[in-house]
Amino acid sequence: MSKATIHIPEKMVWTQNSAGARGTLFRGEMNVEDKVFIFRVRWPAGFRSSPHLHSVERVVTVLSGIYYYGEGTEIDEKAAIACGPGSVIVVPPQTSHFGFTVAGVEFQEMSIPANK
């Protein structure tokens, strides 16, 4: 019988990219088109994610802070929606979107491949 995998916050291993975002992978492999992955992310104050798209559906759950979400090929801060803790953002495949934070945010992102 399989056992559950438990991720305790104090024991999570975080990596940091050159822009200052930090992340930890709970399940799967990042950006493998036909695989589910679950990834937790921390963006520092002032972080911006440029417009981009994904080939599969993504589900983002905001855990703390405010995640500003918008759609389009350019960042339009006025059109972005402020998503606080508990907010869930379901991004369809091939949807150009961007995100940013003013004071920092932590969220969890999951990929949903077609037919999974």
Image (tube, rainbow, N blue to C red):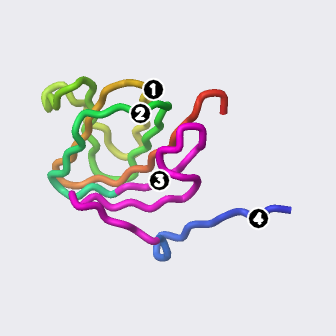
| Residue 14 falls inside the magenta stretch | yes
Q: How many marks?
A: 4
Location of residue 1 with respect to 111 vertically, above or below: below
- Report, in whole angstroms, how far the alpha carbon at label 4 lies from the one at label 3: 20 Å
| Residue 39 falls inside the magenta stretch | yes
Residue highlighted by disc 4 = 3
Q: Earlier in the sequence, mark 4 or mark 3?
A: 4
Q: Earlier in the sequence, mark 3 or mark 1?
A: 3
Location of residue 26 with respect to 97 vertically, above or below: below
Residue highlighted by disc 2 = 54
**Residues at marks 4 and 3 touching, judged by CB atoms closer than 8 Å:** no
Q: Does dot 4 land on a helix, a strand or a loop? A: loop
Residue highlighted by disc 1 = 93
Residue highlighted by disc 3 = 39
- Report, in whole angstroms, how far the alpha carbon at label 1 lies from the one at label 4: 32 Å
Q: Does dot 1 land on a helix, a strand or a loop? A: loop
Q: Residue at x 31, y 65 (%)?
A: 16
Q: Residue at x 29, y 53 (%)?
A: 105
Q: Residue at x 23, y 61 (%)?
A: 18
